Amino acid sequence: MDEEFPDEDISDEGYLEDEEEPLQDVDLSLDETDGDFEASIVRRVEDETGEFLLDDPLYEEEFGVTFESFETIPAALDIASVEVNDNEETYSFRIQAAGGGLAELFEERAKTVKYTVYLDTDLDGASDLLLTTTDTPYEGTVVSSDFEIIEQMPSLEMEDDAITLTVSREHAGDRFDWLVVSGYAPSEEAFYTTPLDNVSFVPNVDFAYPSGLHRTVNLLALHSRTRVIRSGYSRCPTSPTPPLKKVPGTRYKGYFISKWWAGARDVAVWCVNPNPGFFADRVSDTSPKGWVARCPFKCGQNSLRVRQSGNKLGAIYHTVADGHCGSVAKDRDGDGRLDVMAFTYKFNTNRVRSCNIERNPSSGVRLARRCKRPVAPYKDPRKVPGSVP
């Protein structure tokens, strides 16, 4: 049975042409110094340490998972750098952590800690392969987005403060884009299974990826009951780019990323108004149809989880944290706080709730959480709230 928003008024204001709050435009243009994106295989990427992604509404709703501060995440899952090497027959991703105890952590609770590498082997902006640790310490696997086994990981090396995942050149090809993610659940029961017996999913807590260009990245997962049945990542295409398409129901153009459906319900993900553009989620088999989430930040780190209830989609959870890349600051509104937008859409009520979460940039402690009352989908994706006063 689909959940409803408890004890809250709902309205149709999201579907109105005029909003009470003025729409604030976001500068989506590239800097002159930014060139076309070139996938580079052999390179080292540094990642800022001491901060994590702490908000995941689905895990909070399903398992009661809450992260009170950055200190609640083990330093062994804080990505400090990633070094990618070409070893002729394989590629290796050596992930250096900010702290030790990694081997012990995996030995004690491999089901609720995770390191994963997403590979986009055809450079179309969507991942094709997942390199992931498994529920068995010191074992890894390479799978497709729908968890078909591609190969057993050629090797997995674990040190006290680093882990190295590998993939065969035969499957990765000669050029690819990549994204590294660490995951963690504070409770040993807070995980989702997958079609593979030895692969589980937990909340994502840290990202690392090549950042020479403004990036808007999106992690996607489709959940059915207690199982993740599809997973991947996407980015707004940069170069080479596919042809622009008219975004349904709008005056904008953009790139179609993906569409998930079950029964008569669906959600489509678009990169709107590039370049680099922003992610936005649209539901169409509803009345009224429209937009239920968007990324308001130039370098946002997005997480989209879709819950399937039986033979139909039940809910959408889209969270986006303000990020930094290049010369773009993390704190877009200049208030000295880390901003997160969390959108929750329930198909049975056809209403979306938008929440603005603010955290201390040094400690990660939650300072505020402001939500709009649930409303109908928005006609214009740019009118999906980017903040909540």
Image (spheres, rainbow, N blue to C red):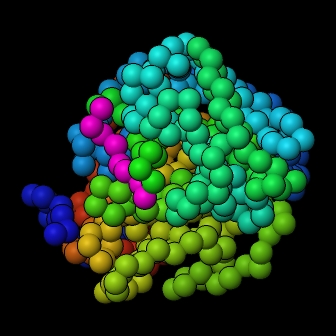
Placement of 232 over or under 117, stated as above or below: below
- The answer to which of 188 and 281 lies nearer the viewer is 188
Give the number of marks.
0
Within the magenta stretch, is there residue 17? no
Q: Quadrant of residue 358?
A: top left
Within the magenta stretch, is there residue 189? yes
Q: Residue at x 42, y 83 (%)?
A: 284
Quarter holding the N terminus is: bottom left
**Residue 333 in the image: x percent, y percent?**
53, 41
Residue 366 in view in this figure: no
**Residue 301 in the image: x percent, y percent?**
56, 47
Q: Residue at x 54, y 85 (%)?
A: 248
Placement of 188 over or under 320, stated as above or below: above
What segment carries the magenta color? 188-195
Seen in the image, is 97 located left or right of residue 52? right
Seen in the image, is 318 located left or right of residue 123? left
Q: Residue at x 47, y 74 (%)?
A: 260
- The answer to which of 116 and 341 lies nearer the viewer is 116
**Residue 261 in the image: x percent, y percent?**
42, 78
- The answer to which of 157 and 13 lies nearer the viewer is 157
Residue 60 in view in this figure: yes
Q: Quadrant of residue 283?
A: bottom left
Q: Residue at x 26, y 73 (%)?
A: 310
Q: Quadrant of residue 331?
A: top right
**Residue 114 in the image: x percent, y percent?**
50, 36
Seen in the image, is 42 located left or right of residue 109? right
Q: Magenta segment, principal secondary structure? A: loop
